[in-house]
Amino acid sequence: MARSLRTDIGGQIYHVLNRANAKVKIFDNENDYRLFEKLLEGATTKYEVKIYAYCVMPNHWHILLKTKKDGELSKFMSWLTNTHTKKWHSLRETTGEGHLYQGRYKSFICQDNDYFLTLVRYIERNPKKANLVPNSEDWKWSSVWRRTKGDRQKKNLLSPWILKEPENYLFFLNEPQTEQELAKIEHAIKKGSPYGNDHWTIRIAKKFNLQSKLRNVGRPKKDGL
């Protein structure tokens, strides 16, 4: 079966996700998380990419970013995932023993308005949703921890948001999102469809030939992402 075309247009905001092969745990300890974050920092020095939010979970990760040039997203992700795979296997002396990731990364374009904030919140509250921490900002391997508890060097990885952070953001972050919000985001992840209001979504889908990705909006998954 032919692979679906991947949108890789400069100047767009993307949510990017990848999972471990067979959804197994690949981040076992602090060294594993630090390695990935170090590589993420390295990737931003190689490519003109802005990181707005991210979260590294035990068996997957999310990144919200903006590229500058056409084709740069795939180069950024290829370097990040391939380098991570090599170093992960090297540390465990398992080089050549199989894939680390389940396949190609998933991505979709995000609108630069309140949908941006909703998506940041979705990414940063993953650890609380999974009952890994009492509050989202307590999860060390995420952008919210870097913003609120990290030193200057830690914060340098992150670019300023395109919108002003709400004054009550941490309280809002730790509140559950609605089923409608989750359904819309999960559909975008599954289909690769643009994420935003209806008018913008239809316009972007037409502009980048993504109309087929707008069909069959699904119900939210019970176990989340």
Image (cartoon, rainbow, N blue to C red):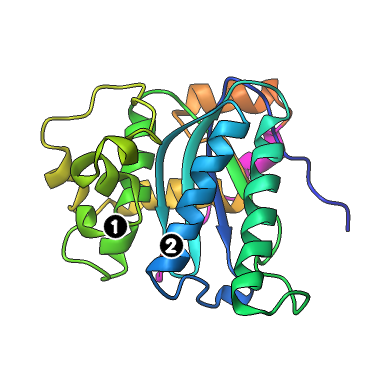
**Other-residue count near label 1 (Cα within 10 Å), few / some / many at <14 / 14–19 / ≥20:** some
Q: Which residue is pictured at 56% across the width and 24% down the height?
A: 12
Residue 10 percent across, percent down from the top left? 64, 22
User: Farthest residue in the right direction?
Assistant: 1
**Magenta span covers which residues?**
210-223
Q: Which residue is pictured at 48% across the width and 45% down the height?
A: 63
Residue 93 percent across, percent down from the top left? 66, 79
Please check the rendered image and state whether residue 23 is part of the magenta-colored stretch, yes or no: no
Marks 2,1: beta carbons within 8 A: yes
Q: Is residue 82 above or below residue 91?
A: above
Side of 9 relative to 142 (left or right) = right
Query: Magenta region's main secondary structure?
Result: loop
Lower position in the chain sequence, tag 2 or tag 1: 2
Numbered mark located on residue 33 in the image: 2
Residue 145 percent across, percent down from the top left? 25, 49
Residue 221 visible (yes or no): no
Residue 187 percent across, percent down from the top left? 52, 50
Q: Is residue 126 above or below residue 27?
A: above
Q: Please, what is the three-letter code of the amino acid marked with disc 1?
A: Lys
Q: Which residue is pictured at 33% across the width and 41% down the height?
A: 154
Q: CA distance from mark 2 to mark 1?
A: 9 Å
Residue 207 lies in what quarter of the image?
A: top right
- Quarter of the picture containing the N terminus is bottom right
Element at badge 2? helix
- Quarter of the picture containing the C terminus is bottom left
Report which residue position mark 1 lands on: 140
Of 84 and 99, the residue lying toward us? 84
